Amino acid sequence: MSPTVRTILLVAYIAITLWSITVIIYYGRRPTKSISWVLAVITLPFAGPALYYLFGVNRRKFKFFSIKQFEKRQKYKSAKPDSGKDFTVSFDDIHKRKLCSLLSKNSGFEALNGNKVTILQDGEETFRTLFSAMEKANKFIHIQYYVLERGDLLEKILKILKKKVSEGVEVRIIYDSFGSFSFRGRIKKKFLEIGASIYPMMPIRFGNLLFSINFRNHRKIVIIDGEVAFTGGVNISDKYIKAEGDLGRWKDTHMCLEGPIVNDIHVVFLKDYFFASKDEEFDVKKYLTLSKNEGDVIAQVVAGGPDYRHPAVMQQYISMVNYAKTKIRVANPYFLPGEAFLQAIKIASLGGVEVSLLVPRKSDSQAALNAMFSQFEELMDVGIRIFLRDDFSHSKILAIDDEIVSIGSGNFDNRSFEHNYETNVLLYDRKISEDINSVFDKLIADAEELSLERFKERSRWRKFLEGLSKFFKPLL
């Protein structure tokens, strides 16, 4: 290498490194995370700044994030119908009132009464109920998924939608371009040919790499005629109906909802569709219906994402933990929360609240599994009970006492807290909470409870792998 080239590279390295360190200092929110990024950009020439640019920039403060691709999204804040105000709940309990107020301010949705909620406990029940509702559609079917995967389920959906379009039903589909990587080519063309309007969320292209590579739309939503909504953790994948690979048939939890809450879930879809589509004249309010009383369940939508002012999902989970009086139940395959949530459940456990964590023994991500296991010793040390189930469950559930439960797409990890667009539904309902806790009790009865003493005896190699994976925890 010639002296001139070496000089150019050295100057470029110094300039890029100084720029990166300046941005980290100016925009960083957490000192420990900022120090890690500073070390990365110094010790990894060019690669460190590139990684920070893609994964570390604080988009809530970095103006470049808001003035470019997300400018269009910010134009449409909300189109909530006034009829939903008739069902707005004001809680007598001060703790519920504070929780509800927090979620309303960070997410924009009130707690609403008058809902009917059906909990769907696995893939077969979910798709049976979903397909039945889709076949009854008269006006429109709006679909949003993180994963639209080739297979029998996607072909079944295509068949239903083809029939409904021929009957005059409007079909709109938005999908995540990373999670639905296989939804392209011939299979996508089939959906376009039947007359469905289809758009990817943040397509991965060189020109928008900053926005697309690290920010995913992880939501799973279906709205039918503005009367029925489906949301939860289930994607469109044959993994839910037949065993594939070492994990077997995936388990998950989903919901079918009717009542005023449907409009709020629909607003989340419509906002995303407005952003993803090229239709600047799309009238979102045309598809919001008058709210009707369908039941007695109080529900509240929690929506979060990287362009929201606050980390809504993280704040929701921490506030729910702080609400707990007797027990906290968590079910999630990617339990990798930040320090704030970990401290919250530790404080709850030390304060006498029974805290139980149900996770799969196996995972579709070995790095995530190792990083998750690296936290278990400190959790069990404060009395948190950890159970390993033999099957793979993709559920994202937080149940508090026998009073409130959250079900949705938000995992307990940095990606759901900071980088992904997520949607949860918080249910203030004793009957549903008791049912969820009953299922949880049956699952932990068949699971293995970890012993702190035995866990400490795991091999040094295992501990090394767990410690190594912990470094990548913010990216998993």
Image: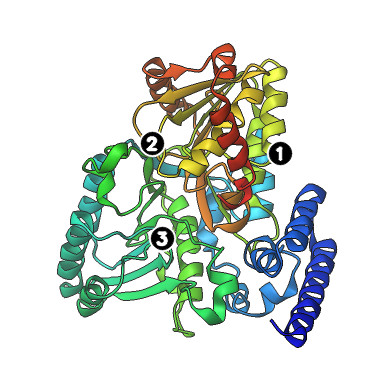
Q: Marks 1 and 2, how far apart in space?
A: 24 Å
Q: Is residue 224 left or right of residue 20?
A: left
- Residue 170 vs 300, above or below: the answer is below
Q: Residue under label 3, please give it.
A: 179
Amino acid at the residue labelled 3: Gly
x then y, percent, for residue 388: 44, 24
- Colouring mode (rainbow / by chain / secondary structure / one colour): rainbow
Q: Secondary structure at mark 2?
A: loop
Would you call the spot at circle 2 few (<14 residues within 10 Å), some (14-19), or many (20 or more)?
A: many
Mark 3 and mark 2 lie on one chain; the one further toward the N terminus is 3
Q: Marks 1 and 3, how far apart in space?
A: 27 Å
Amino acid at the residue labelled 1: Glu
Q: Residue at x 61, y 41 (%)?
A: 468
Q: Residue at x 73, y 25 (%)?
A: 347
Q: Is residue 447 left or right of residue 84?
A: left
Q: Residue under label 1, please give it.
A: 339
x then y, percent, for residue 243: 23, 40
- Residue 100 vs 66, above or below: the answer is above
Q: Is residue 406 visible?
A: no
- Residue 169 vs 261, above or below: the answer is below
x then y, percent, for residue 446: 36, 17
Would you call the spot at circle 3 few (<14 residues within 10 Å), some (14-19), or many (20 or more)?
A: some
Would you call the spot at circle 1 few (<14 residues within 10 Å), some (14-19), or many (20 or more)?
A: few
Marks 1/3 in contact by CB < 8 Å: the verdict is no
Q: Is residue 245 left or right of residue 84?
A: left
Quarter of the image for residue 48 reads bottom right
Query: 288 or 363: nearer the eye?
Result: 363
- Residue 77 vs 396, above or below: the answer is below
